[in-house]
Image (cartoon, grey):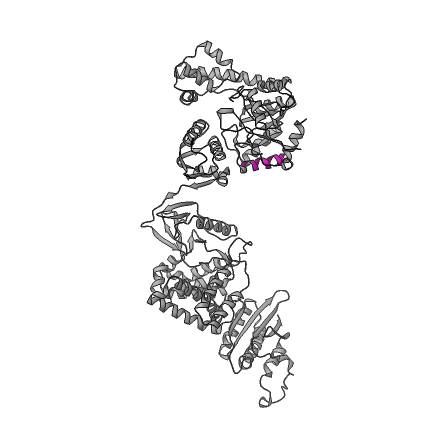
Amino acid sequence: MAEAKIALTGRIDSNNAPRVEQDMLGQLAGLGQVPVVLDAQELQYISSAGLRVILRLKKNYPDLTITNVNSEVYEILEMTGFTEMMTVEKAYRVVDVAGCEEIGRGANGTIYRIDQDNVVKVYNNADALEDIQHEREVARLALILGIPTAISYDVVRVGESYGSVFELLNASSFSKILAQEPEKMDWCVKEYVDLLKKIHSTVVPAGKLPDLKETVLDWARFMLDYLPEEAGKKLVAMVEAIPHDDHMIHGDYHTKNVMFQNDEVLLIDMDTLAIGHPIFELASMFNAMIGYSEMNPEQIIAFQGFDAETGRTFWRKSLAEYLNTKNELKIQEVENKARIIGYTRMIRRSIRRKGMETEQGRAEIEHWTGELLELLARVDTLMFSRNELEVEAIEENLEQVQAFVDEQLEAADCSPKSQMQIGLAVEEIFVNIARYAYAPEKGRATVRVEVSDAPVVVTITFMDHGQPYDPLAKEDPDVTLSASERAIGGLGIFIAKKTMDNVLYEYKDGQNILKLKKNL
Amino acid sequence: MESLQIDLHMHSTVSDGTDTPQMILEKVKQAGIGLFSLTDHDAIKGSGEILSIRTAEDPFFIPGVEFSCKDEEGKYHILGLAYDPQAPSIQEVVDLGHEYRMRKVRGRMAQVTQEFGYVFPEDEVVKLLQNDNPGKPHIGNLMVKLGYAQSKEQAIREIINKVHFKGEYVRPEEAIRGILGAGGVPVLAHPSYGSGDQLIFGEEMDARLKRLIGFGLQGVEAFYSGFTPRIRKEMLNFAEQYDLYITAGSDYHGRNKLIKLGDTGLAGIPCEEYPRGLKRFLERVLP
C-alpha cells in the first residue's frame, strides 16, 4: 500500500490547528487507510492543540510516522508520550569531520575533536542508531555507579554514518600524554591503574551489562578448529572454570580511551562495557600495548602515537601497580594468563579478517599460535589473585617466592622477627615441594598469603598437585643426631612447626594443601 | 455494575458545537453511550433542554457545564457536573461569565475600531450580543459581512488577535463555589492541557491541583480524547494521590473538530477495572 506523505510547516498551535487538520484530511481524502508519514523538517513548534490533531490523525490512520523532527519538537513528543505511541524519527544535525584531529579509536568507532569543547564519535557501522542508544545507556549506568565518563548529548549525521557528540573540554588522552611527555610515565600509570581498580571494584546490578565470559568462551571455542585437540580443550576448560564475576570491566581499556580533563581522569568509548573477571580486561590491555604490535612495531606508533618500547614499559608498570607488587614472577604469572586470552582473541580476529590470505597475516597467526601453545603447556588456570603467587616449583624460584611473601608481610606491618621466622619456614616448605612433590618431573606450586585483622594472624598456604604427602605424619627428626645421620627432608617441617603457631595439612581435590599460621 | 459507555464532556450549538442538544441526544443514543453530560462553555441552557426532552428510555444524563476561568496563576476549564439546574448559585456563575463576556466582546470591538478604524454599526452589535456565547468567531463573521475581511479566520488572525484587550474572567474559586452550591461536582477539564493549548506536568500540575483542591475541586478528567496513555497515567496517579473523582470526556464539538462522541480512552476497560475515583464518581451520580 502506497504511503501518504504530508509536510508539516512552521508552527502548529491553537490558532491554526483546525486549518492544519482540514488540510491534512483534504490530502488524505479518498486514499483509504494508508500509512501516513508526517515530514516535520519544516516544523518549528507544536503546541498541545497541534498534538491533539496528530493524535486524532493517529486514531484514523494507525500506521503513522513522523520524520525529521527537530530537537525542540522531539522533546515535546517525548514528554507527552507520543514517541511511545508512534514512530518518531529525529532530524540529525550534519557534522563534517574532514581535517579534524583524531583523538580516540575503539572497536566500534573513531573519535574526532570538532571544536575546542566538543568531540564526535563516528560509528563504523552505518546503521548505528541502536549502538548509539546502547552506548548512551551504558555510559549513564557507569556514571550512576560512580565511574567518571562523558555522556553524549546529541546524535549527528557524519557522511553516511552517525555520530554522537560529547563535551570534552581541553582533554588529552593518555596516549597523547605518553607520546608528548614521556617523563609523566609514572603519573600516567598511577592514574590509569587507580581508575582501572575503581572500575573493577564496581558491582553492576544483574542484567544491566553483558557477561564477557560468554564472549571469551566463543573465542576459545573458535580455536578448537585451529589448535591440537588437547590444547584446544584445555583452553576452553580454563575459560569455563573462570567463576562468574559481577564486577565491571571496560572491555577496551587502552590509553586512547582514558582522558585527562580538568584534573579528572575519565573514560570514553563505553560501548564495550561488560561484567566479568579482571583477567579479560588485562588480556585486552596486553593486546593494545604489546599483542597487536608484537610482530609489527609500526602498528602501535600509528595507533597510539608512542613506540613499542613505551607500550611495553607502560604495560609492565601498570600490571605491577595493579597487582600491587614488584615481584617479577607474580607479574609474569598474571601476564601469561592475560596473554592466553589475548592471543586467542587476536588469532580469531585475524583469521576472521582473512589474515590467512596474506603473508604478514600468516606470520602473525603462526607466531601467536606458537606462543599460545607454549603457554597452554604450562599454565593451568586463568584465575589470579593479588595475594597468591603461582610459580614453577623449582629451587631457582625460591628467592622470588620469599620476596613475594615479604612484600605481603610488609604491607601487613609484620615485625622483622616474625618476618624472619616466616621467611625461614617458607624456604623450608617451598624447597621441599621443589625437590620432592613432582620428582622426577616438574610441576607448579601456589603460595597464598592471608592476613586477618583482630586477632592479626598470618596464614601462608602452599598448594601443589604433586604426590599426596602429609609432612606432619612423620615423626619429628632427632635433632641430637649429627647432620650426616639425619633423614633428609624432615628438618624443614620441624622448623616450621617450631616457629609457627599452627601447621595444618590436607589433601583435597588432588592438591596437597599445607597451611602455616602465625599470630602477630 | 454492567458495561457502560461514558462521555461527560461535549458541546452543542449553545456554545461552539455544531449539533443542537436534540441532535446530541440522538447521536448519544446511536453511539450506544449509557451515561452522558452536555457541557457547553459557560452555559447551562443546553443541559436544561436535554432534561426537558429526555425520556426514561434514553441514556442516563447529568447536567453539565464547562466554565472558562482565569486568575493570576493561569487559565482553567472547570467542568460542573450533576448540579441542580434550579439552584441559583450555578446560574449566578453563568450570569457573571456572560456579563464579563459581553463587556469583553464590546471592549474588543471598540479596540478594533480604535486601532484599525473598522466601525461596527450598533444594530449589528446588539444582534451579536444576543448570541448565547458571543466571541471572536462572531466578531470575525460580522467583519466578513461588513466587508472588512475575506474570511472569519483571516479576520481573527490578522485583526482581532492583533488587538490586546484585557478582559475580566470568572475566577476558579467562583466557579467551584457556584458548582458546589448547586450540589454539583467541580472537575478540572483536560488538566494537562490547561485551558486547552498548554502542557502542564509534574510539579507544575501538582501545584495547580493543590490550589484548586484548596478551592474545593473534587475531580479530574483523566480520560480525555486528546490524552496519550502517558498523560492519562499521570492524571490517574494524581487522582489517586489526592483522592479525587475521575471523569471521562471526549470534548465532542460536532463538525467543528474531528472528535468522535464517546472517544475518551475508557473504551476497552471493563467496568470492574475502572479506577477507584471513577467508580466513586459513578456511585455518586448514578441513580
Provide the residue span drawn in magenta.
B231-244
Residue A455 can be seen, yes or no: yes
Residue A296 can be seen, yes or no: no
In the visual, does A259 lie left or right of A477? left
Placement of the N terminus of chain A among the 4 image quadrants: top left
Above or below A89: residue B97: above
Placement of the C terminus of chain A among the 4 image quadrants: bottom right
- Looking at this view, is B42 or A152 the one in front? B42
Question: Would residue B234 be counted in the magenta stretch?
Answer: yes
Question: Looking at the rendering, which quadrant does residue A453 occupy?
Answer: bottom right
> x and y percent of residue A362 in the render?
36, 68
Question: Looking at the rendering, which quadrant does residue A509 occupy?
Answer: bottom right
Mainly helix, strand or loop, the magenta region? helix
> x and y percent of residue A438 in the render?
54, 80
Above or below A112: residue A89: above
> x and y percent of residue A461 in the render?
58, 72
Question: Would residue A195 be counted in the magenta stretch?
Answer: no
Above or below A35: residue A316: below
> x and y percent of residue A418 in the render?
59, 73
- Looking at this view, is B141 or A4 the one in front? A4
Residue furthest to the top: B123
